[in-house]
């Protein structure tokens, strides 16, 4: 029998927990290729289906992820669980409206190349503007950037905030 240290067991449990939340999300919501139905872009570039069973539109609110944690809409903690979900499974919040794409990033996330590629393809195919907000780990909006046509601008601002220690007071680490 191989004995593991407490820290190793805790990390193993944390990885298992994150994996189970991600699997729960995929089972509960399913996946979609239609940006009009999407609620989140996952680390592998796939998108969670927030259509609620209707085709071509998102009918579920992003806060529906609270149910993955055994909580219910109306408990007053919905925004907190959106942030927790985004951090735990590295999900980008996404919505599309009138040809424009909106993404919400959390400063403690590390968006994957697959996520950036998915956003880039959606922008290319949709031809609209990109709106983005960046939040710190406490849920405070750090950047409300308005609109851009440049995904590079979004990545640069995100990376700058993460890497520049002068922003530690703004980011609330």
Image (cartoon, helix red, strand yellow):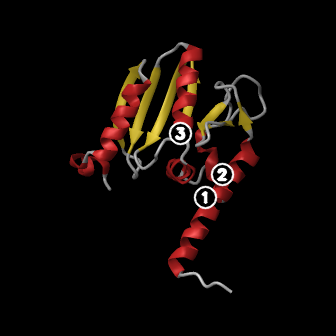
Picture coordinates of residue 75, whole percent (x, y): 58, 54
Badges 3 and 1: C-beta atoms under 8 Å apart? no
Picture coordinates of residue 86, whole percent (x, y): 53, 47
Badges 2 and 3: C-beta atoms under 8 Å apart? no
Q: Is residue 99 visible?
A: no
Residue 141 numbered mark, or none: none
Q: Earlier in the sequence, mark 2 or mark 3?
A: 2
Distance CA(mark 3)–CA(mark 1): 15 Å
Pick out the residue farthest to the top. Answer: 127
Q: Earlier in the sequence, mark 3 or mark 1?
A: 1
Q: Is residue 173 visible?
A: yes
Instruction: Rate crowding at label 2 as few (under 14), some (14 to 19) or many (20 or more) other CA atoms within 10 Å.
Output: some
Residue 92 numbered mark, or none: 3
Badges 1 and 2: C-beta atoms under 8 Å apart? yes
Helix, strand or loop under label 3? strand
Residue marked by disc 1: 18
Picture coordinates of residue 20, whole percent (x, y): 68, 58
Q: Quadrant of the N terminus?
A: bottom right
Distance CA(mark 1)–CA(mark 2): 6 Å
Decide: is 56 above or below 127.
Answer: below
Decide: is 6 above or below 63.
Answer: below
Q: Quadrant of residue 52?
A: top right
């Amino acid at each position: 029998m191989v004995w593991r240290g407490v820290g190793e067991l805790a990390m193993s449990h944390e990885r298992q927990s994150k994996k189970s939340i991600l699997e729960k999300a995929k089972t509960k919501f399913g996946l979609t290729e239609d940006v009009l139905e999407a609620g989140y872009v996952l680390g592998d570039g796939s998108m969670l289906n927030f259509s609620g069973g209707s085709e071509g539109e998102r009918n579920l609110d992003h806060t529906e992820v609270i149910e993955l944690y055994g909580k219910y809409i109306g408990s007053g903690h919905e925004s907190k669980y959106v942030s927790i979900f985004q951090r735990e499974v590295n999900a980008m919040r996404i919505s599309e409206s009138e040809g424009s794409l909106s993404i919400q990033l959390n400063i403690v996330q590390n968006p994957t190349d697959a996520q950036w590629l998915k956003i880039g393809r959606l922008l290319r195919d949709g031809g609209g503007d990109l709106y983005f907000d960046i939040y710190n780990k406490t849920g405070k909006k750090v950047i409300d950037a308005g609109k851009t046509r440049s995904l590079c601008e979004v990545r640069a601002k995100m990376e700058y905030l993460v890497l520049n220690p002068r922003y530690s007071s703004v980011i609330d680490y």
